[in-house]
Amino acid sequence: MSKQRTTGPAKSRAASKSEANQSEKEVTANESESAVAVGEQATQPTVTIDGKEYTLESLGQQGREQLQNLRVTDQELQRLQDQLAITQTARNTYARILAEVTKSVTPVK
């Protein structure tokens, strides 16, 4: 059984502190891909939203689309956070190298 967790709604950096302090909804999808033995019922994929479990089928087309939108958005947020970490590391390295270079240069003032 695979388990995927998505947290939403996403908050932008421009969001106010009051918005940032509001609790985010937790969405967890559980999908079963295991073989079903004779006589057993197949478990339907479920999603947990705000502590309540729903079958994906019960969400309807619109609900499943919004769940997919959350997943894509969370993946993009993670990609951007990773890119930001890489960029910050590069900036820190450039600043450290510049500080080393300026040690051998006489300042104007």
Image (tube, helix red, strand yellow):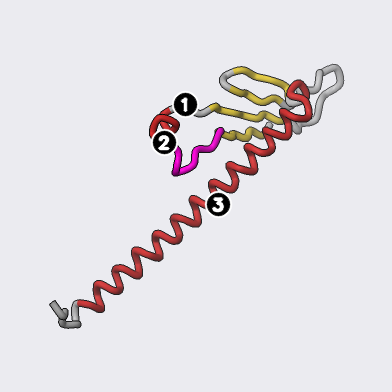
What's the residue at 57%, 19% (across, down)?
Answer: 51
Indicate the quadrant where residue 26 lies: top right
- CB of mark 3 within 8 Å of CB of mark 1? no
Type of the residue with mark 2: Ser
Q: CA distance from mark 2 to mark 3?
A: 23 Å
Which circle marks residue 79 in the picture?
3
Q: CA distance from mark 2 to mark 1?
A: 13 Å
Which circle marks residue 23 in the picture?
1
Q: For the N terminus, which image quadrant?
A: top right
Of callouts 2 and 1, the N-terminal one:
2
Q: CA distance from mark 3 to mark 1?
A: 23 Å
Q: Locate residue 11, reporting x and y percent.
A: 50, 38
Asked if 99 appears above or below 50 in the picture, the reply is below
Q: Which residue is mark 2?
A: 16
Of callouts 3 and 1, the N-terminal one:
1
- CB of mark 2 within 8 Å of CB of mark 3? no
Q: Badge 1, how many Cα within 10 Å: few under 14, some, many 20+?
A: few
- The mark tally for this picture is 3
Type of the residue with mark 1: Ser
89 vs 14, nearest the viewer:
14
What's the residue at 19%, 82% (across, down)?
Answer: 104
What's the residue at 63%, 33% (across, down)?
Answer: 3
Give the magenta-colored segment's residue range. Answer: 9-15
Mark toward the viewer: 2 or 3: 2
What's the residue at 13%, 77% (across, down)?
Answer: 109
Asked if 79 appears above or below 17 in the picture, the reply is below
Q: Locate residue 85, reporting x and y percent.
A: 44, 55
- CB of mark 2 within 8 Å of CB of mark 1? no
Q: Badge 2, how many Cα within 10 Å: few under 14, some, many 20+?
A: few
